[in-house]
Image: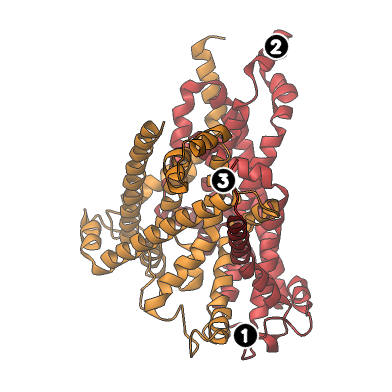
């Protein structure tokens, strides 16, 4: 079959997917762009063209700026902690010990637990009156009185990050473990003969094998952390005093709670742009490290 | 091999036990809460181990008496199964021809890259127009409408998985069948699809788990028992005025059961699916 007719056939076979994607993603995205230049309400018709007013107001809004910082903090701290804990757990699971297979199987559990169930579970653990964390810390003598972990602006975001890390570090561990198992045995053996200590061995022998897969995990986790909604909505709804409000929560409030579709759309596109820039920067970084690691 | 001092071995076991406790303790506590009598959960100091195992909450939630907590739970369970099932079937049906086409015709691959790049879009960027369209079509608070919206998440993902699956089936087998006189669709039906069965099953399970887990769109687009999914029902319970925390925990255990069982049984396939992008990348 000739090249052109194969291409035609390929497009024909892709048509159903592309039609659906344009209908549920492409067109809504274009519509969001259109809405972002209007003062449209969620219900009712139309709305007037207001130019870049929505964007200008949003970027100058102190709520937006504070939310951006909260989101960045959540993403940076939780992803960094997940990477470190994940690699440490993978290094452990790469050792030989009894019960290793069972422990590796257990790592799938937090990943498989639905996000909303995870959020609910931790909300119960942090409960100010009956929660397990308060009970455990009191019984161990570490705190005198029960605290409202999710009710105080000083601790709520950290409590959320812990819950998010617990669910996501095992996935990083499994990805890192798969990469570790691809390190040829004779290379580690040779480095031992050459007298490399454990830290040098990790840095120069093992890390090059980990960098590629970890960068991919880092990119995906950062994008997800930046878009975070579920766990925060279920645990705190952005409170107390908006201390855990992330960008997705702010868009939800603007577009759906206050029904300001136009300004909500402009905010959603700002978030999209931030994520895209982040992903592009990362992609460049991945290409660079992949080039230097080999 | 590495030298192994007894001290090092000891250190490894201590770390392994620590990791096991970190992973298991929250999950175990969720289950213990679900079978502890309400008085035990409200006791100070907290009773970590129930005096008697009380499984009655499971029957409460799974009963279908009208206007009971069970009715709300079972209807959301049914909705979740329906929405996730429909969206999965539709996503696989779209993914098979598209994945095969991209696998065999690399020149159209850029279109799949574009589809996959939509992963970066935050759902909030699509939510307002989707809400307005569903309202216009009368599909708000409707399982079909929600399943349709879930294709935004599921279809790119299944197409990508199916494409890598087809990549591992040699073209030559198909070419041989065609030389023997089989048409394209016959070849796909007799040769390729049976070989792609395992990857199709993995993709379907992944897609089902994604849909089962989804919360944001379900929260926005459903409002009562006709379409509310399990994740929304659980968030309602957690944020509502339920005084028995054990009941919330029970709902969590029931919602977690299918994905956890799938995760444990399908471990090998899931891990290779999760890591394939990473390790090759």
Residue that numbered label 1 is attached to: B243
Residue that numbered label 2 is attached to: B176
**In the figure, residue B96 lies in which quadrant?**
top right
Q: Is residue A169 above or below residue B174?
A: below
User: Real-space Cα distance between discs 3 and 1?
Assistant: 42 Å
User: How many C-alpha atoms fall within 10 Å of the one at disc 3: few (<14), some, or many (≥20)?
Assistant: many
Numbered disc 3: what chain? Answer: A
**Which of the numbered marks, if any, corresponds to residue A244?**
none
User: Real-space Cα distance between discs 2 and 1?
Assistant: 67 Å
Query: Can you say which quadrant of the picture contains the N terminus of chain A?
Result: top right
Residue that numbered label 3 is attached to: A177
Residue lying at 67% horizontally and 81% vertically, measured from the top left: B48
Q: How far across and down, in percent of the image, does residue B261 sit?
A: 72, 55
Q: Is residue B258 above or below residue B269?
A: below
Q: Nearer the viewer, mark 3 or mark 1?
A: 3
- Residue A47 as seen in the image, left or right of residue A56: right
User: How many C-alpha atoms fall within 10 Å of the one at disc 2: few (<14), some, or many (≥20)?
Assistant: few
**In the figure, residue B51 lies in which quadrant?**
bottom right
Numbered disc 2: what chain? Answer: B
Q: How far across and down, in percent of the image, does residue A215 sit?
A: 43, 43
The answer to whether marks 2 and 1 sit on the same chain is yes
Numbered disc 1: what chain? Answer: B
């Amino acid at each position: 079959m000739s090249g052109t007719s194969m291409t035609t056939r390929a497009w024909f076979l892709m048509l159903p997917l592309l039609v659906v994607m344009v209908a549920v993603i492409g067109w809504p995205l274009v519509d969001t762009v259109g809405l972002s230049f209007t003062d449209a309400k969620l219900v009712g018709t139309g709305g007037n063209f207001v130019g870049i007013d929505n964007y200008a107001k949003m970027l100058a809004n102190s709520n937006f700026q504070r939310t951006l910082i909260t989101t960045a903090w959540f993403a940076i701290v939780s992803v960094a902690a997940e990477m470190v804990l994940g690699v440490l757990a993978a290094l452990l699971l790469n050792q030989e010990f009894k019960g290793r297979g069972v422990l590796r199987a257990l790592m799938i559990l937090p990943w498989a637990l639905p996000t909303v169930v995870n959020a609910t579970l931790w909300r119960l653990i942090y409960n100010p009156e009956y929660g397990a964390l308060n009970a455990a810390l009191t019984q161990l003598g570490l705190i005198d009185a029960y605290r409202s972990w999710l009710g105080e602006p000083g601790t709520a975001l950290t409590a959320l990050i812990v819950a998010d890390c617990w669910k996501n570090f095992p996935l990083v561990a499994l990805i890192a473990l798969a990469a570790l198992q691809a390190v040829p045995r004779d290379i580690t053996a040779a480095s031992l003969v050459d007298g490399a200590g454990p830290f040098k061995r990790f840095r120069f022998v093992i890390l090059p094998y980990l960098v590629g897969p970890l960068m991919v995990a880092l990119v995906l986790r950062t994008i997800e952390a930046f878009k975070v909604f579920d766990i925060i909505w279920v645990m705190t709804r952005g409170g107390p005093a908006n201390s855990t409000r992330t960008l997705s929560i702010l868009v939800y409030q603007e577009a759906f709670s206050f029904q300001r579709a136009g300004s909500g759309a402009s905010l959603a596109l700002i978030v999209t742009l931030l994520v895209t820039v982040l992903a592009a920067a990362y992609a460049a970084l991945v290409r660079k490290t992949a080039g230097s690691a080999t | 091999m590495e030298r192994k001092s007894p001290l090092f071995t000891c250190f490894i076991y201590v770390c392994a036990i620590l990791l096991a406790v970190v992973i298991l303790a929250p999950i175990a506590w969720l289950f213990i809460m679900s079978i502890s009598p309400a008085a035990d959960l409200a006791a100070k100091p907290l009773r970590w181990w129930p005096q008697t195992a009380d499984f009655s909450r499971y029957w409460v939630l799974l009963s279908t008496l009208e206007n009971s907590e069970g009715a709300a739970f079972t209807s959301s369970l049914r909705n979740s199964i329906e929405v996730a099932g429909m969206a999965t079937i539709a996503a696989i049906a779209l993914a098979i021809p598209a994945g095969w086409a991209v696998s065999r015709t690399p020149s159209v691959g850029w279109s799949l890259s574009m589809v996959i790049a939509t992963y970066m879009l935050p759902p909030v960027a699509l939510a307002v127009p989707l809400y307005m369209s569903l309202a216009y079509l009368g599909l708000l608070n409707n399982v079909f409408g929600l399943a349709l919206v879930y294709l935004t998440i599921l279809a790119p993902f299944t197409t990508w998985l199916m494409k890598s699956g087809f990549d591992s089936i040699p073209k030559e087998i198909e070419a041989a069948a065609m030389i023997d006189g089989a048409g394209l669709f016959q070849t796909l039906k007799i040769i390729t699809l049976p070989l792609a069965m395992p990857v199709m099953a993995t993709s379907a399970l992944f897609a089902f788990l994604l849909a089962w887990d989804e919360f944001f769109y379900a929260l926005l687009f459903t409002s009562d028992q006709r379409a509310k999914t399990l994740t929304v029902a659980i968030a309602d319970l957690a944020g509502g005025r339920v005084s028995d925390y054990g009941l919330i925990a029970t709902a969590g255990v029931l919602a977690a059961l299918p994905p956890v069982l799938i995760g444990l049984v399908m471990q090998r396939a899931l891990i290779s699916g999760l890591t394939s992008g990473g390790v090759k990348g």
